[in-house]
Image (cartoon, rainbow, N blue to C red):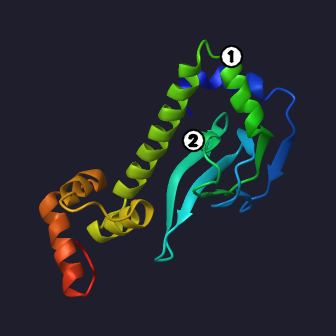
Amino acid sequence: MIEIMLDHWLNCFDGAPERTLDEGETLFRRDDEVEWAFLLREGRLFLRRALQDGGLLTLHTANTGDLVAEASLFADQYHCDAITDIATTVSMIPKAKLVEHLENTSSDRLSIKAFERTARELQTLRTRIEIMRRRKVADRLDAYLELLGHPKQGEWVRVADWIGVTPPALYRELARRRRHGANIT
């Protein structure tokens, strides 16, 4: 979460109901409707996305004091699963209540829009970091394509930069895929 806003978030959750999750339990799943905002009171949650190859991409690890999946405040559905590996407690309030609080306590409407943009940028950055943690070019490319789709014609060099590989390394992987019948433009 954005550290400067921590105290601001905490008072929104004063007196909010809490939910305790056991090890391995899921708080929400990808494509669930976003109805709640969650503040992690104790424990840890992994925001993960299952990939087509059966692997998991951890987009973020939320810890005590974090607002969970803050970019989801501005989405209709979750884009990942939230799963705990230890006993975890979250406070929860309706998403609409938190957004209303933000709008009412902001000095202007521009503040909530700036936060929305920042939350989305943070979500993108976390995704990019997790993709770049993968060791193989092929694995990085698979994750990129699954999450973001194919780039426009002539934009592969930007993909190379985004996944943290050199253009020649990416072009070798693309050539390998073409030799094996993949439709790469």
Residue 2 visible from this viewpoint: no
Are there few (<14), some (14-19), or many (20+) residues within 10 Å of tag 1? few
Question: Residue shown at 64%/54% (left/top)?
Answer: 77
Question: Residue shown at 69%/31% (left/top)?
Answer: 99
The image position of residue 76, as x and y in percent, is 65, 50
The image position of residue 113, as x and y in percent, is 53, 28
Q: Nearer the viewer, residue 169 or 112?
A: 112
Q: Amino acid at mark 1?
A: Thr
Q: Nearer the viewer, residue 52 or 100?
A: 100
The image position of residue 129, as x and y in percent, is 39, 49
Tell me how far mark 2 sits from mark 1, CA to CA: 19 Å
Q: Quadrant of residue 183?
A: bottom left
Residue beneath disc 2: 71
Residue 28 vs 5, above or below: the answer is below
Residue beneath disc 1: 105
The image position of residue 152, as x and y in percent, is 26, 60
Q: Amino acid at mark 2?
A: Ala
Question: Which element is circle 1 on?
Answer: helix
Mark closer to the chain start, 2 or 1: 2
Question: Residue shown at 51%/57% (left/top)?
Answer: 58
Residue 176 vs 59, above or below: the answer is below
Q: Quadrant of residue 111?
A: top right
Question: Residue shown at 68%/16% (left/top)?
Answer: 105
Are there few (<14), some (14-19), or many (20+) residues within 10 Å of tag 2? many
Q: Which mark is residue 115?
A: none
Q: Residue furthest left?
A: 168
Quadrant in which the C terminus is drawn: bottom left
Q: Nearer the viewer, residue 118 or 140?
A: 118
